[in-house]
Every structure is written in C-alpha cells, then in structure tokens.
Amino acid sequence: MSPSTHFVKAISLAVFIPLLVLGNAMAHTERKADYEKLHKKASSSLVTIKCVLKIQGMGGNREFEREFTGVMIDPKGLVLCSGVRLGTSKMMRGFGTVTPTNIKILSGNDTEGEEAKLLTSDPDLDLSWVQIEKPRAKGYAYLNLSQSKTPKLGATLLTMKRLDKFFDRTAVISEGRLSGITKKPRKLFVPTSSLDVDPGMPVFSQDGTAIGIVVLQSPDPEDMDANSRQMSNSTAALILPSAEVMKATKRARITAESEGSEEEEEEEE
C-alpha cells in the first residue's frame, strides 16, 4: 500500500471518528430531551388507584387491598385502568365473582385519595372506567388520547408507569420499538420485548403523542387450551390504539348513562 493511500485513510478516519462521536452525542441529547418532555407532559396524568377486591368463589369469600396505577383521561375525573388490575377482566372468571369496592383515586400530591365508583368495564378489551364522585372544580391533569396516529414498524415507542409506594410512586419511562401490528382479534400494536409494558399504562411515540394503552389480551377462558404452554402463548400484553380506546370510552359513557337511568327508574318505582 502506497504512502498516499495510508495518508488518505488516516485523513478519512480523522474526519469520520469525530463525526461519529458528534452524532452519538446529538442522539443522546435528543433522547434526553424526549424523556424530559414526555415526563413533564404525561406524568401528572398517572394516578394511583386504591381499592378492596371482594372475591366470591368455591374457596369461600375473600377480600384484599390493591393499589395500582391508572390514567386520568378527562379533566372531570374520569380514570382509565386495566381490567386485570381492577378484577373486571374476563381472565378473572376462574377466581369467582370479583367486585371492586372502596375505590379511591390519588392524584398529584394527594395522599388521602378521593372516593370514586366503577362506571363500567369492557372485559374483552381489559379496560375499566372509574369516575371520581365529587371532582374538583379546577379539574385534573389528564392525558389527551384524541390525537391518534399509527407508528411505522421499527418506530421508537416510550411507555410510562409509576413504581409502587415503597419507591415514592416515581414515574419512570421505558423504551422499545414497534415490532408488528395484529388484525385479530382486533388491531393491536406489538412492542418489542425491551418495552416494559404494564396493563393499563399509556404508550407514546417518540414525539410524545399517546398512541395507545397497554391491554392484556387472551382467548375466553373456556376456549383456552388446558396446556399451560398454550395458555402462555395465547396471552400477551399488547397496545390498543388510542382511536379504539376513545371509541370504547364513548361506549362506556353511553352504557353508564343507560344503567344510571335504569337505576333511577327502579328507585322511583
């Protein structure tokens, strides 16, 4: 190899390496900005739900306290949460009749909680809607799910959840990518295993748009193979697109209003 060739390679490396370092530094800065922006935008919409689950089954009557995270989706105190967490998912049928009671919502710096009631649930979607009974006049910080978008395969996904009380319920962010999109049993976004998916928690695109909510999907218990491996393969935490969550929320409101009207008629009679 001639001296001139060595010289050209040396010059190329001298230019390429600083550019590579600069590129990595810029990417790190952008990633940090994405995290900070998302944390500022969405963390206040994550609320703590405390309740008592009463279970009536073959093993007798039991009850136990539960605490988990939900998402405020309306400034008037409407909270969306996982059916599995609240005991309303179809996956809970094998445990008997599960009834959530003594529901309280803790938002912001509140340590006591505000009383709330279960409006309705969609067992197939693994979603439940809980309403604060006496919402604050000034409203609540909430997550806007109306700006729906479908990310492309390989797109960066960010999710947020709160740690438990022992860790001061700190909001943390996890990162992954979109690995696929299902058509059955419905449209669902499939994340890579690196994304820390927690049922009921929101998932965002890199620009901070909420693309959906994590839901636990599985066949009906009676249709599920008894083999544990088959059961494991048929159950997954996937992402229900925001547009579908909004449609489900609209149906939930209608259902709650209908049930409320029926209760009033029964009381009048």
Image (tube, grey):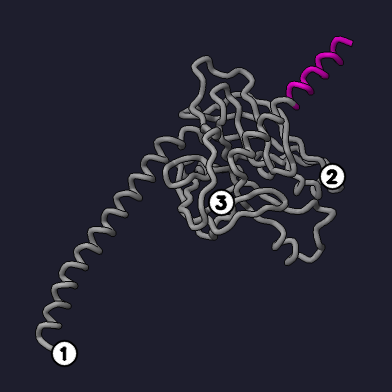
Q: Which residue is mark 3?
A: 197
Magenta span: chief secondary structure: helix
Disc 3 residue type (three-letter): Val
Q: State the residue at coordinates (14%, 77%).
A: 8
Disc 1 residue type (three-letter): Met
| Residue 260 inside the magenta-drawn segment | yes
| Residue 12 inside the magenta-drawn segment | no
Q: Which residue is mark 2?
A: 57
26 sits to left or right of 70: left
Q: Is residue 265 above or below residue 226?
A: above
Q: Which x, y percent locates residue 54?
A: 76, 37
Q: Which residue is mark 1?
A: 1
Q: Tell me the quadrant of the picture where the C terminus can be found.
A: top right
Q: Residue furthest right?
A: 269
Q: Secondary structure at mark 3?
A: loop
214 sits to left or right of 123: left
Q: Nearer the viewer, residue 23 or 52?
A: 23
Q: Which x, y percent locates residue 153?
A: 52, 56
Magenta-highlighted residues: 255-269
Q: Secondary structure at mark 2?
A: strand
Counting residues from the start of the chain, the first of labels 1 and 3 encountered is 1
Q: Quadrant of residue 248?
A: top right
Q: Is residue 114 above or below residue 207?
A: above
What separation in Å lies between label 1 and label 3 (alpha carbons)?
Answer: 54 Å
Q: Residues within 10 Å of mark 3 (few under 14, many from 20)?
A: many
